[in-house]
Amino acid sequence: MTKPALRAVPSAPSGPFTLPPLPYPESALEPVISARTLSFHQGKHHKAYIDKLNAAVAGTPYAEMDLLAVVKKTCGREAKKSIFNNAAQTWNHTFYWHSLSPAKTEMDKKLSAAVTGDFGSLEALQQLLTKVATEHFGSGWAWLVVKDGKLQVVDTHDADTPAAHGATCLLTVDVWEHAYYLDRQNDRNAYAEAVVKKLLNWSFASDNFARAQASA
Ligand code: MN
């Protein structure tokens, strides 16, 4: 299998916002995530967030902004909740597609050393991420982030994203039911465990970690 080109940073186009292509074919993540799930998830759910975002920002200054700037500027503002939800879900999903890889990936030396320092081992990090993803109550996301110079596993509710709260995101696992229900019904743990063990893109995480270090 040729190594897919996954090193590009998720695009952050200014509005009107567009659905970026998946960085691999829809069937590439099988059997962990089926082509049917990926087709609905990206082609329907992700696209719907972008369509709603474009409708909500039409004619406003947000339409001219970088996507992450829209997320940060609308975070925590009740009157802008719909824009925030759709902008954050647009950003989160593009980040999620890049957090997954059909090919085996490895951490670089710097991230590997940080994982050992902050979690003890890669296995301990994988167990924690799986637990947080499985136990998150309701819809949301489980993340590996860097905040205040330390690697952390965190979860966010609904559309919320650590990128709006001063953290640099390294990897994410979508734990909304639409991410796994077609394949595994209510067994979120089986989905989370398989994604964390088999699909996470440690090369992408390493690139994000290097960027966090460079801007610290
Ligand atoms: Mn989703």
Image: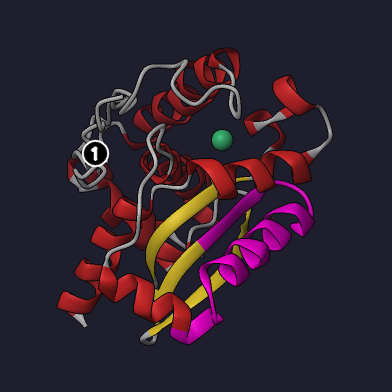
| Label 1 residue near ligand 1, CB within 8 Å | no
Q: Position of residue 111 (x, y in %)?
A: 33, 71
Residue furthest front as drawn: 1
Name the residue located 66 percent from the left edge and 29 percent from the top edge.
178
Q: Quadrant of residue 101?
A: top left
Residue range in magenta is: 117-143
Horizontal side of residue 110 vs 151, given as left or right: left
Where is 188 relative to 121, above or below? above
For the image, the number of numbered tags is 1
Q: Which residue is mark 1?
A: 63
Name the residue located 54 percent from the left edge and 42 percent from the top edge.
198
Horizontal side of residue 115 vs 2, given as left or right: right
Q: Position of residue 120 (x, y in %)?
A: 55, 82
Give the amino acid at mark 1: Ala
- Is 84 colored magenta in this rendering? no
Horizontal side of residue 135 vs 114, given as left or right: right
Chief secondary structure of the magenta portion: helix
Most foreground residue, 144 or 101: 101
